[in-house]
Amino acid sequence: MELSPLTEAFVLHFGEMGSRWGINRTVGQIYALLYISEHPLPADEIAQKLGFSRSNVSMGLKELQSWRLVRLQHLPGDRREHFSTPDDIWEIVRTLAEQRRRREVDPTLSVLRDLLVAQPASESDKLAQHKLQEMHDLIELLVGWADEVSKLETKELIQLLKLGSRVVSLLELKNRLPILGRNARRRAETAPPGDDMEPEF
Amino acid sequence: MELSPLTEAFVLHFGEMGSRWGINRTVGQIYALLYISEHPLPADEIAQKLGFSRSNVSMGLKELQSWRLVRLQHLPGDRREHFSTPDDIWEIVRTLAEQRRRREVDPTLSVLRDLLVAQPASESDKLAQHKLQEMHDLIELLVGWADEVSKLETKELIQLLKLGSRVVSLLELKNRLPILGRNARRRAETAPPGDDMEPEF
DNA sequence: CTGTTCTTTCAGTTTTTTCTGAAATAACTG
DNA sequence: CAGTTATTTCAGAAAAAACTGAAAGAACAG
C-alpha cells in the first residue's frame, strides 16, 4: 500500500463504511484516498497505492464521476487525468444529498404516487394505500425541508444546525406573536380525519 | 406471490431500494410487507407470500429485530410468533436514525478521533489530519443536531420541517429583537451541560 | 413424557457482485 | 503519420453475499 498508517486506517474504515451504505468497498476507498490527499491523483497512482488493478480504479472513478463526487483536472506537464474531491466539505454533503435524492428518493416518490392513484382492488388495498400515503407525505416533507435548507448559505446552515432543537423556542415566539405568522391562530383546530400528518400552524 | 398487485409493486420497489442502501433485498421486502400489512404476520406466511424459504425469513426477521425495526407479538389462539412494524411512521424514522448512528456514525467518529490524536508522522499527515478534523466536526455537528431534534415531539418536528429555510428569517427576527433576551424560553432538557456547541444568538 | 408445531442454525449451493488481464480505443508526441 | 502513453471496455475468474433444505432445538399440548 505504501500509505502512511494514518491514511491507511482512514481509507480502510471508509471503504468498510461505504459497503454498509450500498457503495462498494473499492469505490469508498478511492474516494477516501482522494479526500485525504493533498494533491489530485492520477488513476495509476491510486491503483498502485490501494493495490487495485488499473481497470478497477477506472471503473470506480467512473462511478464517482457519475455521482459528481470527484473532479477531473489536467496538470501542466502531465498527460494523465488527475482526480480530486471538492475542497469544501459542505459541497460534498450537498452533492451527496442531491444525488441520493435524484437516484433513490425521487423514484420512490414516483412509485408511491402511482400506487396512490391506482384504483384499490379491495378493502385491504385501501388500507394499504393509507399507509403508502403516510410514507409519501413523510418523504415529501423531508425532501421539501432538504430542498429549502440546501438553498441556505453554508454559514446560515451551520448556525441553524448549532441551534438544534432550541429553534423550537423561536417557533413558540412566533406563535405568541400572531401578527407574524399567517396561520398562527389555527393551532387549536382538530386535524381532519384520515390525515394525521398535517400540522396546523 | 398471491399478493395484490399494489402490495407486490410496493414490496418489490422497497426491496430494490433496500439493496441500494446496504440492506439485502429479502430483508427490505419483508419489511415492506410488514409495513403495508393490516395485521401482524407469522414467519411462515411471510415466506409463503414472498416466495422465500422459511429459513431465509427467519434470518431476515432476526436482522430486522436486531435493528429494532419490527416487533414480535403473540396472538391469542396461535402459537406462532407474529411480526409487525410500529404504527407510527415517525417512530420508524427515529429508530432508523438512531440505529444508523449507533452502527455507523459513532464508530466513524471514534476512528476519526483516534486518528486525530495520533502523532502525525509527516507534514502530509498533518494536512491529512486537518481534513479529518473537518470531517469530524461536520459529522459531530450533524449528529448533535439530530440528537436535539429527535427529542422533539412529532408535532413540533413536523412544524419545524414545514418551516424549512424560513426558519432563518425567524432567527433574524430574533436577532433584531434583543429585548426578548438571550435564550429566552429555552427548554431545560434541551441544554445538556458542557455543551460546546453553544450558538451565539 | 410423547408427540406436535414452530423456530433457528448452518453446511453447502446458488446467485450476485466485484475484480482482473487482455484487448480495444483514445489522446497525445514528434 | 508511426509510435507511445493513457484510458476504457468487457469476458471470464474470484470473492462475497444470499439462500436453501435438513437437522437440531424450543415451546408447548395433551
Image: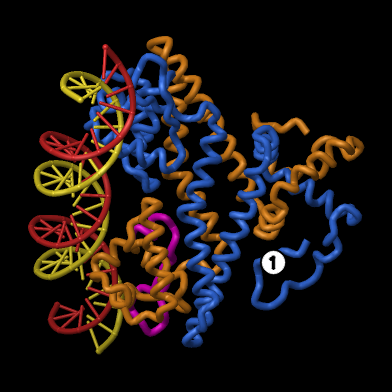
Chain colours: A blue, B orange, C red, D yellow
Residue B71 colored magenta?
A: yes
- Range of magenta residues: B62-83
Residue A172, image x, y percentages: 81, 51
Q: Secondary structure at mark 1?
A: loop
Location of residue B13 by image quarter = bottom left
Q: Horizontal and vertical percent for residue D10?
A: 20, 47
Left or right of residue D14, residue A107 in this image? right
Viewer-closest of C19 and A9: C19
Q: Residue at x 37, y 14 (%)?
A: A77
- Could you say which is closer to the camera, residue A52 or residue A190? A52
- Image quarter where the C terminus of chain B lies is top right
Q: Quadrant of the N terminus of chain B?
A: bottom left
User: Where is residue B143 drawn, in percent x and y?
Assistant: 56, 40
- Residue positioned 65% across, 34% down in the render: A154
Q: Quadrant of residue B123?
A: top left
Who is closer to the viewer here, D1 or C25?
D1
Q: Chain for mark 1?
A: A
Residue at the spot x=35%, y=75% of the render?
B42
Residue shown at the point (51%, 68%) measured from the top left = A112
Q: Which residue matches tag 1? A: A198
Q: Residues within 10 Å of mark 1 (few under 14, many from 20)?
A: few
* Residue B54 appearing in the image: yes
Does any portion of residue A50 appear in the rendered image?
A: no
Q: Quadrant of residue A79?
A: top left
